[in-house]
Amino acid sequence: MALISTFLDELAANSELLEAYLDDPEATMTDYGLTEEQQGLISGNDLPALRSELEREVGPKPYIVVHKGIVHGVVHSNEPEQDQEPPS
């Protein structure tokens, strides 16, 4: 099974993979070896779930999340959830 973090890293670095992803995201993720669950995390709108999976895979490494051309923010394990107050 492929890792989401590895896919996102390669997607950012490999223009051919990015072009294939933009043309057919589902087929590209399947061909890369991502499970349906992993694909749902990437394609869905559940940023906390994606953050949790990335933390499990690599720890506190930041990722800029762009979905359908919209920057949703940086995923980083040291940041509070959007609806939570920062620790005092």
Image: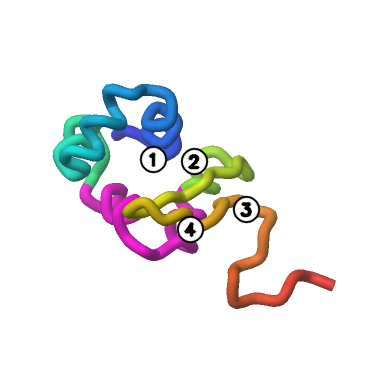
The residue that mark 3 highlights is 77
Give percent across and percent down for residue 50.
44, 55
User: Marks 2 and 3, how far apart in space?
Assistant: 12 Å
Tell me where residue 31 sits by quadrant. Answer: top left
User: Marks 1 and 3, how far apart in space?
Assistant: 16 Å
Amino acid type for the residue under numbered disc 4 = His
Compared across the picture, whether 78 is left or right of 10 comes to right
Label located before the other in sequence (1 or 3): 1
User: Marks 3 and 4, how far apart in space?
Assistant: 15 Å
Marks 2 and 1: CB-CB under 8 Å?
Answer: yes
Furthest residue in direction right, as rendered: 88
Picture residue at 18% right of the left edge, 38% below the top: 23
User: Marks 2 and 4, how far apart in space?
Assistant: 20 Å
Compared across the picture, whether 69 is left or right of 86 comes to left
Amino acid type for the residue under numbered disc 1 = Ile
User: Marks 2 and 1, how far apart in space?
Assistant: 8 Å
Picture residue at 59% right of the left edge, 43% below the top: 62
Query: Residue 45 magenta-drawn?
Result: yes
- The stretch of residues the image draws in magenta is 36-53
Q: Which residue is more in the foreground, 58 or 68?
A: 68
Tell me where residue 29 sits by quadrant. Answer: top left
Local crowd size for mark 4, using a 10 Å CA cut-off: few (<14), some (14–19), many (≥20): few
Label located before the other in sequence (2 or 4): 2
**For residue 57, which numbered disc appears in the image?**
2
Marks 2 and 3: CB-CB under 8 Å?
Answer: no
Does the rendering let one see residue 29?
Answer: no
**For residue 72, which numbered disc appears in the image?**
4
Furthest residue in direction front, as rendered: 69
The quarter of the picture where the C terminus appears is bottom right
